[in-house]
Amino acid sequence: MAEQILRGIPVSSGVAIGKTYFLNRGSNTSIVRMDIDPQDVAEEKNRLHSAFTSALVELEKISEKIPGELKEQAAIIDSHIMLLKDKKFQSASKKYIQDKLINAEWALEKAVSDIEKAFSKIEDEYIRERIHDVRLVADRVKKQLYGKPSDIKSFKQRMILLASDLSPADTIELQLDKIMAFATTSGGKTSHAGIIARSLQIPAIVGIEGLAEIQDGQFVILDGFNGKIIVDPGEEQLAHYTELKYQFENYQSQVNRNCYLPAETIDGYKVKVSANIELFEEVAAVIDNGGEGVGLYRTEYSYLNRDDLPTEEELFEEYRDLSSIIYPEKIIIRTLDLGADKIATQFGPTREANPALGLRAIRFCRKHPELFKTQLRAILRASVLGNISIMFPMISGLQELLEVKKLYYQVRGELKSQGVNFDPFMPMGIMIELPSAVLISDMLAREVDFFSIGTNDLIQYSLGIDRTNKHVSYLYQPLHPAILRSIKYVVDAGHEAGIEVSLCGEVASDPYCIPILMGMQIDSISLNPQAIPGIKRIIRQATMDECKNLLKRVLESDDVQESNRLVKEMIFTRFPEELMFYTSLIED
Amino acid sequence: MVNTVDQSNLEIKIHLDNEYGLHARPAAVLAKEAQKFSSEIQLCFDGREVDAKSILDILTLAVPHGGSLSIRASGADAREAVKHIKKLINGRFEGNK
């Protein structure tokens, strides 16, 4: 096979050189057939059986949680349950394992294709289309199969993982220490996969086509700087990338050495640089990279990848442990931001025409007050044991904020009457990530102790683009005048009211955007731990004067391209050595 | 036992009168209810005969709206089974989630 290059969007820097593995989740085209030994038949059948059982348990749990008014949903889930329980489905698959000596996945695939054949003969279109339900059910079983240890056999050595998509839940199930890089077909610049990759400090590419055609075990180079996968690379490429990989690792260790120095400009302006984390394990990376506390702790992970909900005790222990490791630095705990792309299956399949505009984050929590209160209690209880702040996501209006505060104070009252300790002075803040919140930030500022601007969502909602849609992700422009004005408006409104304003989007880890944020006199930024050393280094070499100057020129510009050019020019002339290894949100 | 023999091999014909024929939801309800009986229960339509306890079988039988099918049961509770399923079909699978 000759050298071949696939291109996508780079989302995490670095170079990986190694063999690929395509993670297939419910995709019919690329299931791998594996021959098994006769003595393994029983084990393989067992594996299939427990996959059916787990899928059934999962569905039954979902079914129980469907609200009574969603009769149609319930009926569909019920028919899926009956399909899973159908003895013929399972026994046909098992028969294939036995007769053909093949793995459970392939056997299931064979059984499904038999059913497909039978269905294709049905004249009634409506009933014929039910094959779709059979496939959905089979996908559930397959998902269970892949979750089982047997798949790990193929992960003996470290791999470059390829997938059509990686959801947050997927990444929990993966053996991260066995993955040296990954690439996904779906996704745009700021999709979740990129966040995960950067937090794991492994190179990654999204929005790249043709991954499924790469055979498992194929030798490739993954270039996370330029978003390239080189299949079957020649000598020259190999030499080049081996060198680049070495240089990058060298640079990183150099930058990391000085990461504990404060982020203070030459002329004495100090910015607090803290970390965004979502996994408990990342807390080590915060400290190792010189993060000044945690500016955003995403609490969703404790709710994902499980059938039940975390208890107050579990959450309390999690927050307590985290905050005590970070202490005396601060940790800002953001309350549950589930919904839309991360919806909890516990509450049944919520089909929304516009999930991003639907029941998510604080709206979801208010709809399920018991779930919300459990988390609030856990945070409050932990507040006496560390330096904790609480933050509410997705606030869209003043009334909504007041309602949330009412509930929050109600929980505090309950704790008090139960004699449970909490810190009555725990700072309380909100995310500013909706255009409406930007425009009334002066009103909101009177009600809270701090703001945190979530630029990922703010850009998405302000510019009306889905950031994971690769067809429109080119419109994701952090230097769009509307975005810059919004950020500035919020910073000014916050300062006017005497509260701290922080920023916690991807923008905070983009070297091109840093001087702009500095120029606005942002109080603190929060970013993925691995980006902290490099960003701190840039801040230490800058002056507030030049940042303000640049900001002024950019704010006067009515052309995004021109703004992009201006910031790039500044970084290029002032910090040329920083750029080689950075991927930026700013278009070339 | 005499009783068992009495009950075996029951067959009744019935007209299917719901909107889309035996599609997913009725098929699920039917299979679920059929599984509650120890008797073997078959559905016959268009010269074919399938297991009423298997939703896949019922779906592939593809009984359209207005189709007339037979229910056949053999076993200890065959009479109750046939009666129950007839009731289900006549009641258009309502009242059984």
Image: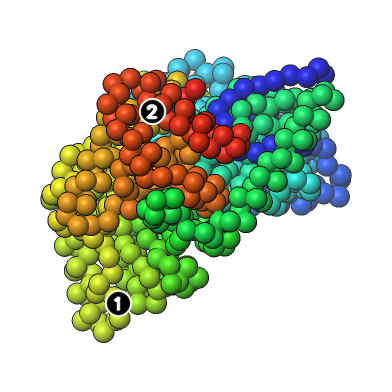
Q: Which residue is mark 1?
A: A422
Q: Which residue is mark 2?
A: A477
Q: Chain of mark 1?
A: A
Using the image as rendered, state which of residue A489 and residue A32 is in the foreground: A489
Q: Residue at x 47, y 68 (%)?
A: A326
A373 left or right, relative to A165: left
Q: Position of residue A438 (x, y in %)?
A: 22, 41
Q: Position of residue B38 (x, y in %)?
A: 53, 51
Q: Amino acid at mark 2?
A: Gln
Would residue A28 be seen by someone viewing this image from the given angle? yes
A508 left or right, relative to A248: left
Q: Residue at x 35, y 42 (%)?
A: A545
A499 left or right, relative to A271: left
Give the CA separation, mark 1 to mark 2. Answer: 42 Å
Would residue B79 be seen by someone viewing this image from the given angle? no
Q: Residue at x 80, y 29 (%)?
A: A238
The mark nearer the N terminus, 1 or 2, is: 1
Do the dots labelled 1 and 2 sit on one chain? Answer: yes
Picture quarter containing residue A126? top left
Q: Chain of mark 2?
A: A
Q: Is residue B13 above or below residue B78?
A: above
Q: Amino acid at mark 1?
A: Phe
Q: Is residue B93 above or below residue A214?
A: below
Q: Residue at x 55, y 28 (%)?
A: A9
Tell me if mark 1 has few (under 14), some (14-19) or many (20+) residues whose alpha carbon lies within 10 angstroms of its own.
some
Using the image as rendered, state which of residue B89 and residue A447 is in the foreground: A447
Q: Position of residue A435 (x, y in %)?
A: 23, 37
